[in-house]
């Protein structure tokens, strides 16, 4: 379809990629908790913008460059793994009442969510290594193929972001009323981040 190898698998991969716990999800949750639905939507648009930059960077040849120099690709993997593990450790060891790990400032939801996405090792590895696998060389249609992929990613990210924002907004009052729930969720997120960091470090 439009030069995409197995469009259904591509959509499934994007959904799974979005659902993996990481800094992007935390940015959406934090922005919604602080700025309500408007803050969450701004952060969602920031995530979409960051994703588009990474995808088109891959199209421009960054993926090929990393494939040519595997040491650079492995360095990205290890740096990403270390970042995720550090972030997870900070969340596990955070004391009650401490400053949030992702300290997103008001009125900067879009910009900071975009920067977090650009620096998110999960997103970098996906677009530089996994994303090119879905381009069908035999039926590639140039910019049309990449445009359809970019639009698909944007639409799925928007739908996912809206879901996270609305759920977070609905649960925000309960979390503020019961700090234990917020602390427990933070610890769970920390475990997931450490686990994903380890998985990223040992992946080939």
Image (tube, grey):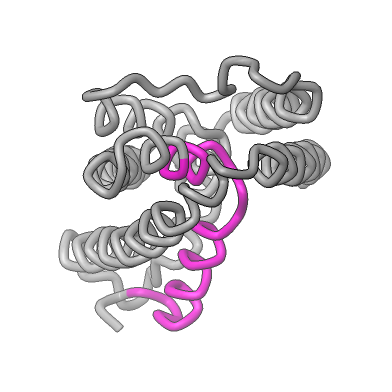
From this view, report whether residue 59 is shown above or below residue 149. above
- The residue that appears at 67% across and 26% down in the rendered structure is 87
Q: Is residue 60 visible?
A: no
Residue 49 lies in magenta, yes or no? Answer: no
- The residue that appears at 29% across and 70% down in the rendered structure is 140
Residue 18 lies in magenta, yes or no? Answer: yes
Give the total number of marks visible in the rendering: 0
Give whichever of 180, 186 is nearer the camera. Answer: 180
Q: Is residue 69 left or right of residue 15?
A: right
Give whichever of 157, 146 is nearer the camera. Answer: 157
Q: In this view, does 66 lie to the left or right of 113?
A: right
Q: Which residue lies furthest to the top in this view?
A: 99
Q: Which residue lies furthest to the front in this view?
A: 177
Q: Measured from the top left, where is residue 116 in percent x and y?
A: 43, 29
**Quadrant in which residue 160 is drawn:** bottom left
Q: Give the range drawn in magenta.
A: 4-29
Q: Measured from the top left, where is residue 57 in percent x and y?
A: 32, 38
What is the chief secondary structure element of the magenta stretch?
helix
Q: Measured from the top left, where is residue 169 in percent x and y?
A: 39, 53
Give whichever of 23, 178 is nearer the camera. Answer: 178
**Quadrant in which residue 82 is drawn:** top right
Q: Measured from the top left, where is residue 152 in percent x and y?
A: 29, 67
- The residue that appears at 73% across and 31% down in the rendered structure is 88
**Quadrant in which residue 68 is drawn:** top right
Quadrant for the N terminus in the image = bottom left
- The residue that appears at 70% across and 37% down in the rendered structure is 183
From this view, report whether residue 50 is shown above or below residue 96. below
Q: Can residue 166 be seen in this view?
A: yes
């Amino acid at each position: 379809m439009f030069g995409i190898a197995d469009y259904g698998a591509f959509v499934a991969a994007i959904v799974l990629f979005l659902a993996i716990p990481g800094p992007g999800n935390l940015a959406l949750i934090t922005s919604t908790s602080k700025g309500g639905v408007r803050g969450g939507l701004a952060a969602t648009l920031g995530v979409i913008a960051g994703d588009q930059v990474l995808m088109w960077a891959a199209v421009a040849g960054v993926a090929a460059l990393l494939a040519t120099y595997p040491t650079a690709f492995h360095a990205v993997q290890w740096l990403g793994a270390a970042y995720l593990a550090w972030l997870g450790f900070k969340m596990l060891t955070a004391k009650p009442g401490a400053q949030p790990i992702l300290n997103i400032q008001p009125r900067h939801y879009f910009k900071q969510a975009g920067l977090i996405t650009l620096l998110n090792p999960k997103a970098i590895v996906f677009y530089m290594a996994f994303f090119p696998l879905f381009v069908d060389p035999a039926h590639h249609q140039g910019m049309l193929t990449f445009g359809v992929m970019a639009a698909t990613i944007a639409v799925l990210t928007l739908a996912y972001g809206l879901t996270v924002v609305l759920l977070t907004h609905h649960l925000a009052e309960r979390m503020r009323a019961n700090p234990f729930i917020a602390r427990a969720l933070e610890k769970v997120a920390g475990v997931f981040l450490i686990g994903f960091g380890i998985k990223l470090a040992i992946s080939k």
